Amino acid sequence: MNTIALVGNPNSGKTTLFNALTGSNQRVGNWPGVTVEKKEGSIKFKDKQYTIIDLPGAYSLGSFSEDEVVARDFILKGNPDVVINVVDATNIERNLYLTIQLLEMGAKVVVALNMIDEAKAKKIEIDINTLSQKLGVPIVPTIASKRKGIEELVSKAIELMEKDVDYKAHISYGESIDKEIENIKKVLSSFDLDYPADWIAVKVLEGDPYVLSKLEKDYNLSKSTLLKDLAEKEEDLELEVIDKRYEYINNITREAVKLPDEHIETLSDKIDKVITHKFLALPIFGLIMFIVFQLTFAIGEDFLGGYIGGLIEILGSGIENILISFNAPDWLISFFTEGIVGGIGTVLEFVPLIVVLYMLMGILEDSGYMARAAYIMDNIMRALGLHGKSFISMIIGFGCNVPGVMSTRTLENKKDRMISILINPFMSCGARIQIYLVFISAFFPDSGGLVLFSLYFLGILVALIMAKIFSKTLFKGESSYFIMELPPYRMPTIRNVLRNMWDNVSEFLVRAGTVIFFVVSILWVLAMLPVGVEAYSQESILGKIGTLIAPIFVPAGYGTWQAAVGLFSGIAAKEAVVAILGMVYAGVEEGSALVNAIQSAFTPLSAVSFMVMTLLYTPCAATLGAIKKETGSLKWTAFSALYSFAIAWLVSVLVYQVGSAIGLG
């Protein structure tokens, strides 16, 4: 099948274009051997099928992050038939740096000049024909968010795919460097290389650590051998190559792009004067998040909350009646009604709130505000030894800690990367929401938004404190610089918001049908054995496991075997906590019964203590797996599991003991 690669700078509209091209025909996995997310889709054009590969967003194709290496490896070794390079029309000069690097690789490139409407609004005049001629590649103006120019773009890509032409950029880097490139190519000519020789030569001159390491390892070619007399001038050579690229770009844009004489203040500029204000930014960020949580409860619980519970109750009764009519044994009826429906059903009852929360977060992301959140947090993060880019991985962790941990690969500095990995599990992922909602419904129904906001805030606070401690102890050293382009504010599109919501909710539903089903099934068996004891009792195997663990949690106010078993199951998957609590509290079959059981077993103070524990304690198995993959170390994985449990226990005990001391118990 013919393959089209999609590459572009962050915030160039690449993801929007990918969604517009592929619609629902997408699948997500990981690139072989790495944790970088691989998005793949398909399109049908004139009765032929084409595969679209969405490469990680990158400003350049160096080797500063795993993302960049994956993108350039696919272009050089994955043999895409054509590359669609998404270029932000409002920032052509900077975006074309990536285009030039693609052309240096010899890729067949079609430029999607995206957000052309925003360029016009800023009075940026672009002569597309001249720009196309100077670059030597087809250029198609697009507005991905409005699906404009999509058909012409695909048509141009397929047309280029079928041509046998050389679109390689022929850049002169200056007489001395050009001569050195030829010398390096002569040395390389006797080797069977994975990459084009002239591209490798440029990378050697840039001092690319990935390429130099590969040459040393695979071909026993050292940097000094290749550069000879120029080895000591490596840093100057790298800067000269970069300067020549930009000089090449300037010569092109000088004739093809006309910027306005004066800066045009856009609506985004006016909004940012307030949103990113030195003193107002943080309070506004806090207020926006508080409103999100309040709306989550107002819409999700008040308007939608009861419907799912009613459907689950009907489903449970229906399954029970069917099994009885077939004279099914009591244990099978119990497994389905109390184990499966009582466990998984309790979790599913809170899906409406998750749907609303992810929709609201999707609106913030699609509008461009979440990028501001990272910018706003930069000063705070820098004071803690990190930078604003680390906060992006924390924001991603609000959805799920697994991609949050994986996203740290974009951080260039090992110190930043390791600290961000270790603190990410403190971000309250979507899986924990069901736990909070049960306890909020039981004790704090009138202030759910405030409680939820407080838990998210506590997670961030603990993460930041630990970041500071780690930067002063385990990971000393300087942080890398933070450079981030703020995208313009846009009206969120319903399609993107719904897709973002569905991606997160569907992942939760899949986990409910697989991981939680497996955990519930195993623990249900343990709750029924040994034969002859009362099901779900302390005498069951499950009860004995909980009894063994429970004393640890007595100082925190919830030293019951049921609570201990619930927390134990959460190490497999946080969603399982509610499912197991629903099962062990007399095998309850609906959320309201679980809420009543929670009210009998906990006090408001111990409920808060329990929620704090679930917020901070050991990450789930999937997150621990991601930590192992990213760090390549069992030691750091074990450290993450143990230190987070210790922190959670200390904070939980502190909350309960202080609360009891001041009379809140």
Image: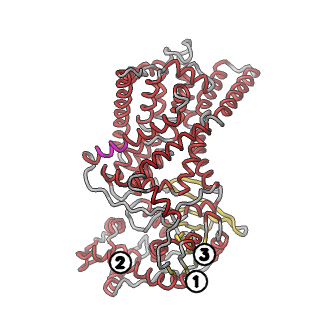
Spot occupied by residue 436 in the image (x, y as percentages of width and height): 51, 33
Asked if labels 1 and 3 touch by Cβ distance under 8 angstroms, the answer is no
Spot occupied by residue 540 in the image (x, y as percentages of width and height): 51, 17
Q: Nearer the viewer, residue 489 or 16?
A: 489
State which tag comes first along the sequence, 2 or 3.
3
Magenta stretch mostly in which secondary structure?
helix
CA distance for labels 3 and 1: 10 Å
Q: How is the image coloured?
A: secondary structure
Q: Nearer the viewer, mark 2 or mark 3?
A: 3
Identify the amino acid type marked 1.
Asn
Identify the amino acid type marked 3.
Val
Circle 1 Cα neighbour tier, 10 Å, few/some/many (<14 / 14–19 / ≥20): few
CA distance for labels 2 and 3: 29 Å
Q: Quadrant of the N terminus?
A: bottom right
Task: Say which element carries label 2.
Answer: helix
Please report the bounds of the magenta region as a residue range. Answer: 463-468
